[in-house]
Amino acid sequence: MSSTAPAASPGLPASVVEARFEELVADFDADRVRTMLAAAPSFEHLVELAAIDPSRLPADIDRLRMLKAVDRAQGKVDAFRMRTLLAVAGEEWSGDSELDRQVRHDIGVMLRINKNSIGAQVARSRRLDQDAPAWLDALDAGEISLVHCLVLLDETENVTDPDALEQIVARALVRARRRTAADLRGI
């Protein structure tokens, strides 16, 4: 019997009391996951989600809800990482190649990531921040995924007209909130 389970009631074996306790905990976890899905994702939710054992949730639908809550929390983390990366590397290129190379090197060493990969991540973060800030906000809110953002960046890479880009970004965000990232291809 676990130390968190209540003592056995007279006439009931400890295993029955413990099983009922486990059911109550699982029900509480499922209710908490449902509550988290109704609210904007937060880092507090991520901590709470990490404390829930998905295999102990009472039904498959609750496990699917858990997966959705984790996915939304991941969007919050991804947006936070992009914004933090921009805080380190700068929201815009400094114009100094040597400084840019040094910053990429420092970030790469700190994160154990190749500086070229960091350069691509910085470039994507800057483009998203500058060209599609609503997308970064939607990622932060758990409404879309990082993959949605990467598809948008890929699909709009050669769009040079600022007005056309603004229209594409706005239309695509409405679509991204309802569809898979693959559905954004060819926007």
Image: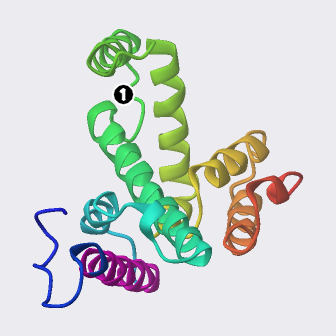
11 lies above or below 137: below
- Quadrant of image for the C terminus: bottom right
Residue at 54% across, 69% down: 63
Residue at 84% across, 59% down: 183
> What colour scheme governs how the chains and residues are painted in the rendered image of this protein?
rainbow
Query: Position of 41 compared to 173: left or right?
Result: left
19 lies above or below 81: below
Read off the residue under disc 1.
94
Q: Which residues are magenta?
A: 17-38
Comparing 147 with 135, the one in front is 147
Residue at 14% across, 81% down: 8
| Element type where label 1 sits in the image | loop
The chief SS type of the magenta part is helix
- 163 within the magenta span: no
Query: Position of 124 compared to 77: left or right?
Result: right
Query: Position of 16 compared to 60: left or right?
Result: left
* Image location (x, y in percent) of residue 126: 48, 42
Residue at 30% across, 13% down: 109
Indicate the quadrant where residue 144 lies.
bottom right
* Image location (x, y in percent) of residue 19: 33, 76
- Quadrant of image for the N terminus: bottom left
Q: Is residue 140 visible?
A: no
Indicate the quadrant where residue 5 lies.
bottom left
- 18 within the magenta span: yes
Residue type at mark 1?
Ser
* Image location (x, y in percent) of residue 60: 61, 72
> Badge 1 local density, few (<14 within 10 Å), some, or many (20+)?
few
152 lies above or below 5: above
